[in-house]
Amino acid sequence: MSDETSSPDKSSLRAIARQRRRNFVATLDPLAHRLAFKVLPSPLARRMDGARTVALYMGLDDEAPAQRLAAQLMTMGKTVALPRVLDRLGSMDFVLWRPEDQLFPGLFGTSHPEPGGGSVAPDVIIAPLVGFDRALNRLGQGGGYYDRAFARFPDALRVGLAWSAQEIDALPADPWDLPLDAVMTEVELIEGPE
């Protein structure tokens, strides 16, 4: 994309990607929006074959709505979990969830199920993002929650979910940034090696 400078910092890139996402979603046909992210592309579904627990998230504002994948995942026999932000220091865990479960307000406008059964270890983490590149680098909100979750569950398949307008030519990657295994947009699946 052409509106980045030669070496923008992550904060500037977040502003650019958020504006692109906002503009894109504002012009998206309502029917196309409702149909987006209801089905996993078959290559990604195959990569999830051995997975038992898939962590989704409840999309906020104009984020890609990961919760729409729940029905297909449950049909595939997967257990679904949502993140629960524990504190403002970047800690979160994952709690089992069914679409009919009541959600409770969490930090930063998040929602999560009541943690009655405790936290679970996901085999797949489907993560929100602000921006991504073709090298499968992920630009998040900046709090480090997903970076810590990826490090805590190193064997989990890491999948970013985004609108195509959030793609950036190249993102800077810090030493602690783990690349994604795949990025799914409303128009394509970008995969790294298995």
Image: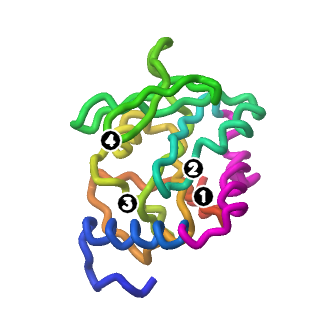
| Residue at the extreme top of the image, as rendered | 116
Kind of element beneath mark 1? strand
Q: Quadrant of the N terminus?
A: bottom left
Relative height, residue 25 to residue 150 (above, below) = below
User: Vertically, is 29 above or below 144?
Assistant: below
Spatial separation of the CA atoms under disc 2 and disc 4: 17 Å
For residue 18, above or below residue 94:
below
Position of residue 2 relative to residue 138, above or below, is below
Type of the residue with mark 4: Phe
* C-alpha separation, residue under disc 3 versus residue under disc 1: 14 Å
Q: Are marks 3 and 1 in contact (CB under 8 Å)?
A: no
Q: What is the spatial separation of the Cα atoms under label 1 and label 4, in whole angstroms?
A: 24 Å
Mark 4 secondary-structure assignment: helix
Q: Residues within 10 Å of mark 1 (few under 14, many from 20)?
A: many
Q: Which of the numbered marks, if any, corresponds to residue 65?
A: 2
For the point 44% across and 56% down, the residue is 129
In three-dimensional space, the C-alpha distance between marks 3 and 4, rounded to whole angstroms, equals: 18 Å
Residue beneath disc 3? 139
Q: How crowded is the residue under tag 3: few (<14 C-alpha within 10 Å), some, or many (20+)?
A: many
* Residue identified by numbered label 4: 108
- Residues tagged 2 and 3 counted as in contact (Cβ below 8 A): no
The magenta span reads: 26-50
Discs 1, 4 touching: Cβ within 8 Å: no
N-term mark: 2 or 3: 2
Q: Position of residue 170 (x, y in %)?
A: 39, 74
